[in-house]
């Protein structure tokens, strides 16, 4: 759930940032700052904000971690439109939405999937770390903690 939410938020933010330089200038530093916050800080913070018996903190941590790679890669893909394609669409008097639908978005798909591939491994790590630092005790992080506490290192 957190992977899906973070990917959708990153995609929407990248589309908005690619359309406006002003919004890109405001959004890119915020995204970089969110990426610089360690998971070890986010997990207890979200556990304190939301109920520790809820799965919301774990999903929020994963969504925050997933947002940055999807945002950065998709925004890069949306900006890298070949000048030949841009000139062709301009000569055909294509509007901005049709240009995005026919040229920009299909051209950005490989970048989006690269960001999603990177984010999926980060999502698993973030979920395990979020469980390790509290929250619901029915996931992989809590099982690793209990196995390590019982000196069952191969199982951990």
Image: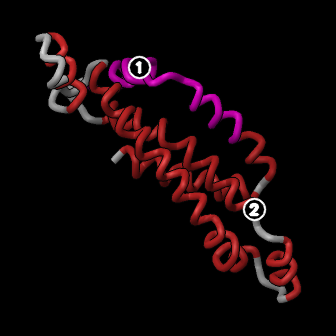
Residue occupying the point 59% across, 26% down: 36
Name the residue rendered at 77%, 79% in the picture. Answer: 95
Q: Is residue 30 left or right of residue 54?
A: right
Specify whether residue 146 is in view: no
The answer to whether residue 109 is above or below residue 63 is below
Residue 32 percent across, percent down from the top left = 65, 33
* Nearest to N terminus: mark 2 or mark 1: 1
The image's colour scheme reads secondary structure
Few, some or many residues within 10 Å of mark 1 (<14, 14–19, 20+): few
Q: Tell whether 139 sits left or right of 132.
A: left
In terms of secondary structure, what is the magenta stretch mainly?
helix
Disc 2 + disc 1, Cβ < 8 Å: no
Which quarter of the picture shows residue 108? bottom right
Residue 109 visible in this rendered orientation of the protein: yes
Residue drawn at point x = 80 percent, y = 51 percent = 21
Foreground pick, 129 / 4: 129
Q: What stretch is highlighted in magenta?
A: 27-51
Of residues 42 and 84, the one drawn nearer to the viewer in this rendering: 84
* Residue 80: numbered disc: 2
Q: Using residue 31 as the reference point, say whether residue 46 is left or right of it.
A: left
Residue 71 in picture, x, y percent from top left:
60, 48
Q: Is residue 44 magenta?
A: yes
**Could you say where residue 72 lies in the image, as x and y percent from the top left?**
64, 47
17 left or right of 22 in image: left
Residue at image coords 70%, 54% = 76
Image vertical order of residue 87 relative to residue 8, above or below: below
Numbered disc 1: secondary structure: helix
Which residue is disc 1 drawn over? 45
Q: Which residue lies furthest to the front in this view?
A: 154
């Amino acid at each position: 759930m957190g992977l899906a939410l973070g990917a959708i938020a990153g995609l929407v933010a990248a589309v908005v940032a690619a359309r406006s330089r002003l919004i890109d200038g405001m959004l890119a530093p915020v995204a970089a700052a969110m990426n610089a916050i360690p998971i070890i800080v986010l997990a207890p913070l979200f556990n304190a904000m939301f109920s520790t018996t809820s799965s919301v903190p774990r999903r929020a941590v994963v969504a925050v971690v997933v947002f940055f790679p999807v945002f950065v890669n998709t925004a890069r893909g949306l900006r890298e439109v070949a000048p030949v394609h841009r000139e062709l669409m301009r000569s055909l008097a294509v509007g901005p939405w049709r240009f995005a639908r026919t040229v920009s978005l299909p051209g950005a798909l490989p970048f989006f999937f690269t960001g999603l591939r990177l984010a999926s491994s980060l999502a698993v790590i973030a979920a395990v770390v979020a469980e390790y630092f509290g929250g619901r005790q029915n996931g992989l992080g809590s099982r690793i903690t209990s196995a390590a506490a019982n000196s069952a290192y191969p199982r951990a």
